[in-house]
Image (tube, grey):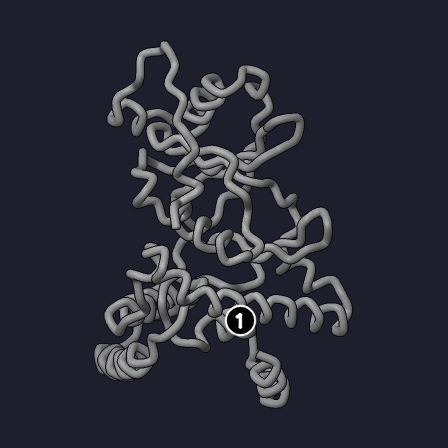
Amino acid sequence: MSYRLFKLEYRQTTKTVMTQTQIYTESSILRLENFLSERSSETLGQIEPLTPDASTREYFRIAWEKATAIACVYPEPFVPQEQSYLDVSNLFVAAGLPVAEIYDFCPEFGVVVHEDFGDRILRPILDSISEKEKDSLLNQAIILIAEIQVATKLAFELDSIASRLAFDSSKLSWELDFFTKHYFETLRREELSETDKRALKAELDEVASELGDRISILCHRDFHAANLMIDRENRLRIIDHQDARMGAASYDLVSLLLDRIDAPPSENWIAEKQQFF
């Protein structure tokens, strides 16, 4: 199966093509303006910076073909066949998953332009609706996790980057070490004793080893309410899926249900969601 996304053709102009080093040193908004000037001068001056996520990517809302689109600007040029967002988007689209359609991209400028879902992120919506409405939306999100897992076979058939990455014990250990550092040092500003550090490290490494043995299925990898949106037609849509990889069947479900909570939910509620899943 060919990669439809990679058939988008980069249209060269008579302008002098900047070297990769020059492009890398230019600001994101300047590179975006240069990209847009090659596509259509009508879009220039209609660039709205958006709040970035916890990454080096920068996002902008731009005018695009009598509507709007989202431009994601990466910190450096990329090779399309090695670009994880393009690759996983292609996989998810082929699987019928509700991700943004990619309109265009430019490896030289480090720009990807995709569908604009609006501004309705699921997380704040869940905090402002009734328990019944919240439960319904969470169940819709759980269905999406199952649909992502159904795409496991397709990921291997397409030789997706996601099929070649995994939550092995090494990756999981790195993530748990990241948690330890930023939970205790950054958030709590607490210095653990060397004895406690060693004991905690040993326990988390044991967890990583056990979970590493359960790699079996495609995971979003960062599936929580801040990476789900409700579009203008009130449909639930998936974003920030570029880090998809193989992992344990429970990974995305735990991420969705236990993200940013102050206290564990009731065992009955967890059991209900597990059963629904």
**Residue ID at (37%, 18%):** 12
Image-quadrant location for residue 65: top right
Q: Quadrant of the C terminus?
A: bottom right
Q: Position of residue 152 (x, y in %)?
A: 41, 67
Residue 215 against residue 159 in the figure, above or below? below
| Residue 196 can be seen, yes or no | no
Question: Most extreme residue toward the top, as rendered?
Answer: 14
Question: Most extreme residue toward the front, as rendered?
Answer: 1
Left or right: residue 124 compared with residue 6: right
Q: Label 1 sits on what residue type? A: Ala
Q: Nearer the viewer, residue 190 or 70?
A: 70
Q: Position of residue 149 (x, y in %)?
A: 47, 69
**Residue ID at (39%, 26%):** 10
Residue 275 against residue 27 in the figure, above or below? below
Question: Most extreme residue toward the bottom, as rendered?
Answer: 268
Q: Nearer the viewer, residue 205 or 63?
A: 63
Secondary element under disc 1, as helix, strand or loop, is: helix
Q: Position of residue 70 (x, y in %)?
A: 55, 37
Residue 1 against residue 275 in the figure, above or below? above
Q: Nearer the viewer, residue 64 or 56?
A: 64
**Residue ID at (70%, 73%):** 135
Q: Position of residue 158 (x, y in %)?
A: 36, 55
| Residue 158 can be seen, yes or no | yes
Left or right: residue 57 compared with residue 203: right
Q: What crowding class fits label 1: few (fewer than 14 Cα within 10 Å), some (14-19), or many (20 or more)?
A: some
The residue labelled by disc 1 is 146
Left or right: residue 160 compared with residue 229: left
Residue 40 against residue 151 in the figure, above or below? above
Number of numbered discs visible in the structure rendering? 1
